[in-house]
Amino acid sequence: MLEELKKRVYEANMLLPKYQLVTFTWGNVSEYDPETGLFAIKPSGVEYDKLRPEDMVLVNLAGEKVEGRYNPSSDTATHAVLYQRFAEKGILGVVHTHSPFATSWAQAGLSIPCYGTTHADYFYGDIPCVRNLTPEEIEEAYEKNTGIVIADEFELLGKDPVAVPGALFKNHGVFTWGKDAHEAVHNAVVVEECAKMAAWTKLINPSVQEAPQAMQDKHYFRKHGAGAYYGQKEE
């Protein structure tokens, strides 16, 4: 079933160690297929150098395994909620990592401010750090509630998940998303690089201010939206 989907998700998962976003098995990638209502995701706890495309696990939006010899990632329920809430906006790929710089901001409970154009090219505004779970939410359904909190916080903050394709989860790590698994990985790399540059910027100048809004707007909208002109136009 969905062999091409599994292959894409396998290849996207293999990019995580390539870009040094994971240590050991600390991360996972999935991609959702709207036609079948299923998504493929990395199996839980399997080392990257032992993975094969056929090892990717197919899951439905209830988080139930449909096909696969392994158990799906322990974060499967989080991915399922993000697809339930964001797929109608065209978000069909999700990544979770504990990449060191971005996770450091998450552990500090701080959003990543937009200090420059690298950040503004990809994220419209700060990369938010959403609240931690309550003890009751942890006990009730930890992974599912992680997804619910991310989606609910985006609504409360008035953030568009397309314009802000990722979030930090306080005391936990990083979640990013995109139109497919590969774009979600791309955004995970961007978050880590922005987190690194923001940390160094704050270290060099503790009183630094965010980039001017006019500059943020220019860089974001020259790459996104109807008036975008960055890159090449398809024939």
Image: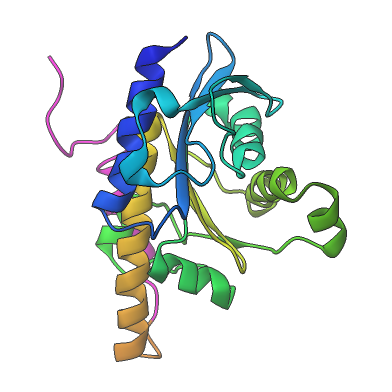
Q: Is residue 131 left or right of residue 213?
A: right
According to the image, what is the colour scheme of the structure? rainbow
154 versus 114 height, above or below = above
Q: Position of residue 157 (x, y in %)?
A: 64, 54
Read off the magenta span.
Answer: 209-235
- Asked whether residue 225 is drawn in magenta, I would say yes
Identify the image quadrant of the C terminus: top left
Q: Position of residue 51 (x, y in %)?
A: 36, 36
Q: Is residue 222 left or right of residue 170?
A: left
Q: What residue do we see at 75% from left, 60% from top?
A: 133
Q: Position of residue 217 (x, y in %)?
A: 34, 53
Viewer-closest of 74 and 188: 74
Q: Main structural element of the magenta stretch: helix, strand or loop?
A: loop
Q: What residue do we see at 58% from left, 32% from top?
A: 86
- Asked whether residue 123 is drawn in magenta, I would say no
Viewer-closest of 185 and 225: 185
Q: Is residue 121 left or right of residue 163?
A: left
Q: Position of residue 40 (x, y in %)?
A: 49, 26
Quarter residue 59 falls in: top right
Quarter residue 147 falls in: top right
Viewer-closest of 63 and 195: 63
Q: Is residue 214 visible?
A: no
Q: What residue do we see at 29% from left, 72% from top?
A: 197
Q: What residue do we see at 68% from left, 29% from top?
A: 63
Quarter residue 110 falls in: bottom right
Q: Is residue 72 left or right of residue 183?
A: right
Viewer-closest of 58 and 167: 58
136 versus 151 height, above or below = below
67 versus 144 height, above or below = above
